[in-house]
């Protein structure tokens, strides 16, 4: 398998990238780390005549902590996120994902922006980021906009980004007091295996240990990362004990829309959702200090 003949345009700035996207649309894709797009081109999942390489745009790189939380540049690699000293404490759920994704070689090239904007249903970072209430910072020559991450991905490999727009950064809000988040996923091997199913959970607890807010997001069991509203409802106002976790797991399982494929049947995935929801919630509770 070869990558078909195409032109690669190196953008030096965001303006240049947006203008190139506009000029060559719809026969164009962005190229970040290339770990998805090059595989897709080789396997003829789609064909384009042009790639716009983002690698030279330094403003898209890096992780910064501000008063409002973390800003993760779209070109930040999974390895950089995994090793960042900022990814600790309330943000530790991000490392639950980055430490288990792919292989070290792939993680060195794969970017956070590519993982999110690629919108592949089994991608590991979107569910964690959505559980943590992250927003997407999108950029085009027409302007900037910020949107909840759960609104960005609208179908398998489909986002609401316009043709001339790119994902510039992800903002993860500063966590409230007594906050904990965790990601539990299951793959068929310990390394280099995509998630058969995954569940990200984030909770903030009141002083008395009852749940003040909760978000449970399912991975690889729906066309998009699935924010389970029923699971959150099952938790609100309750002490996060085993019974509450079991009820939330049942609610999450009922909202899953898994398919059967070579990695597992729909029924197997439903069972995974149940187990992984309980695991993620218990880990989140522990990180919240309970
Ligand atoms: C062997 C192997 C194992 C893998 N295992 C895992 C795994 O366990 N978990 C997992 O989640 N993923 C896995 N992946 C998938 C992949 O590595 C990740 O999704 C990666 O983060 C994609 O980032 P990238 O920079 O390589 O994206 P690219 O391949 O460069 O781009 C992916 C898509 O996103 C678009 N894009 C990229 N950047 C932007 C941007 N800033 N704005 C808008 N659109 C953009 C591209 O146009 C393309 O459509 C694996 C891949 C391989 C090859």
Image (cartoon, grey):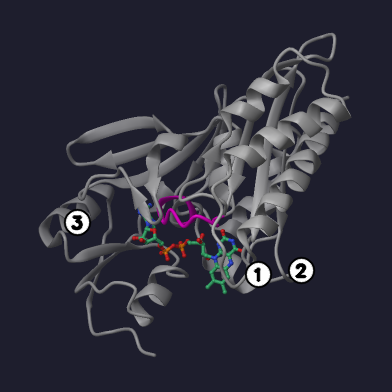
Ligand 1 within 8 Å of disc 1? The answer is: yes
Which segment is the magenta one? 115-123
Disc 2 to disc 1: CB gap under 8 Å: yes
Closer to the camera in the image, 286 or 259: 259
In front: mark 2 or mark 3? 2
For the residue labelled by badge 3, is the local secondary structure a helix, a strand or a loop? helix
Quarter of the image with the C terminus is top right
- Pointer 3: what residue? 21
Using the image, tell me which numbered label, if any, was put on residue 193: 1
In this orientation, does residue 181 appear?
A: no
Q: Residues within 10 Å of mark 2 (few under 14, many from 20)?
A: few
Report how far apart the C-alphas of labels 2 and 1 lie in the structure: 7 Å
Report how far apart the C-alphas of labels 3 and 1 lie in the structure: 32 Å
Ligand 1 within 8 Å of disc 3? The answer is: no
Using the image, tell me which numbered label, if any, was put on residue 190: 2
In front: mark 3 or mark 1? 1
Which of the two discs, 3 and 1, labels the residue nearer the N terminus? 3
Q: Position of residue 216 (x, y in %)?
A: 64, 34
């Amino acid at each position: 398998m070869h990558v078909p003949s195409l032109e690669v345009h190196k953008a030096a700035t965001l303006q240049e990238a947006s203008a190139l996207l506009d000029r060559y649309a719809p026969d164009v894709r962005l190229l970040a780390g290339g770990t998805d797009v090059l595989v897709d081109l080789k396997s003829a999942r789609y064909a384009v005549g042009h790639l716009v390489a983002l690698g030279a745009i330094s403003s898209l790189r890096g992780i910064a902590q501000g008063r409002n939380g973390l800003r993760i540049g779209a070109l930040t690699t999974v390895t950089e996120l995994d090793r960042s000293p900022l990814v600790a404490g309330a943000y530790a759920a991000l490392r639950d994902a980055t430490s288990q994704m792919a292989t070290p070689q792939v993680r060195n090239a794969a970017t956070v922006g590519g993982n999110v904007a690629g919108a592949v249903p089994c991608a590991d970072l979107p569910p964690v980021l959505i559980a943590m209430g992250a927003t997407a910072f999108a950029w085009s020559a027409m302007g900037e906009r910020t949107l909840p991450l759960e609104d960005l991905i609208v179908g398998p490999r489909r986002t609401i980004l316009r043709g001339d727009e790119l994902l510039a950064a992800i903002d993860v809000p500063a966590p409230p007091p007594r906050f904990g988040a965790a990601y539990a996923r299951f793959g068929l091997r310990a390394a280099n295996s995509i998630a058969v199913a995954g569940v990200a959970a984030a909770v903030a607890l009141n002083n008395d240990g009852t749940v003040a807010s909760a978000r449970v997001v399912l991975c690889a069991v729906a066309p998009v990362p699935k924010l389970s509203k029923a699971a959150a409802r099952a938790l609100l106002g309750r002490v996060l004990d085993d019974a509450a976790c079991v009820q939330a797991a049942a609610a999450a399982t009922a909202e899953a829309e898994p398919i059967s494929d070579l990695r597992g049947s729909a029924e197997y995935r439903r069972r995974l959702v149940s187990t992984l929801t309980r695991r993620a919630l218990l880990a989140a509770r522990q990180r919240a200090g309970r």
